[in-house]
Amino acid sequence: MNITHYTDKQLFQTTADGYTAYLEYTVENGRLLVLHTVVPPAIGGRGIAAELVKTAFDYARRQGWQPAATCSYALIWLQRHPAYTS
């Protein structure tokens, strides 16, 4: 999966079958905070949201930021991957 990071827009994005999926974030107080993860229903169920969240949190870790989320999907992802919060 090819995920593009637009740092100026604070956005990770990918396209599948002509549909665009994306993750929006902000950085505050040493945390990368995932605000929204959007995957159109036509391309849902393929693990795209998981890849977007993992890519964003891997980026956060490389920057020395703590992964965090207000997005419900990203919050559940963090619960399932506790190594990202330690």
Image: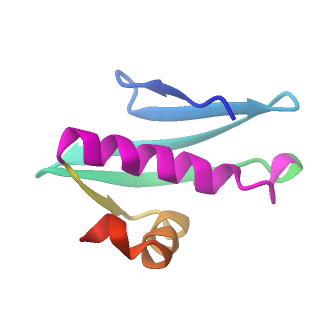
Residue reaching furthest left? 29
Residue 16: percent from left, percent from top: 80, 34
Residue reaching furthest front? 83
- Depth check: 37 or 76 in front? 76
Q: Height in image: 11 above or below 23?
A: above
- Depth check: 35 or 31 in front? 31
Please identify the dominant SS of the magenta region: helix
Residue drawn 35% across the image and 70% down it: 83
Quadrant including the C terminus: bottom left
Q: Height in image: 80 above or below 40?
A: below
In the drawing, does residue 20 fall left or right of residue 63?
Answer: right
In the drawing, does residue 22 fall left or right of residue 8?
Answer: right
Residue 47 is covered by the magenta coloring: yes
Q: Quadrant of residue 69?
A: bottom left
Residue drawn 56% across the image and 52% down it: 37
Residue drawn 17% across the image and 46% down it: 64
Its colouring scheme is rainbow
Residue 11: percent from left, percent from top: 46, 33
Residue drawn 72% across the image and 56% down it: 47
Magenta span: 43-64
- Depth check: 25 or 52 in front? 52
Count numbered badges in the picture.
0
Residue 29 is covered by the magenta coloring: no
Quadrant including the N terminus: top right
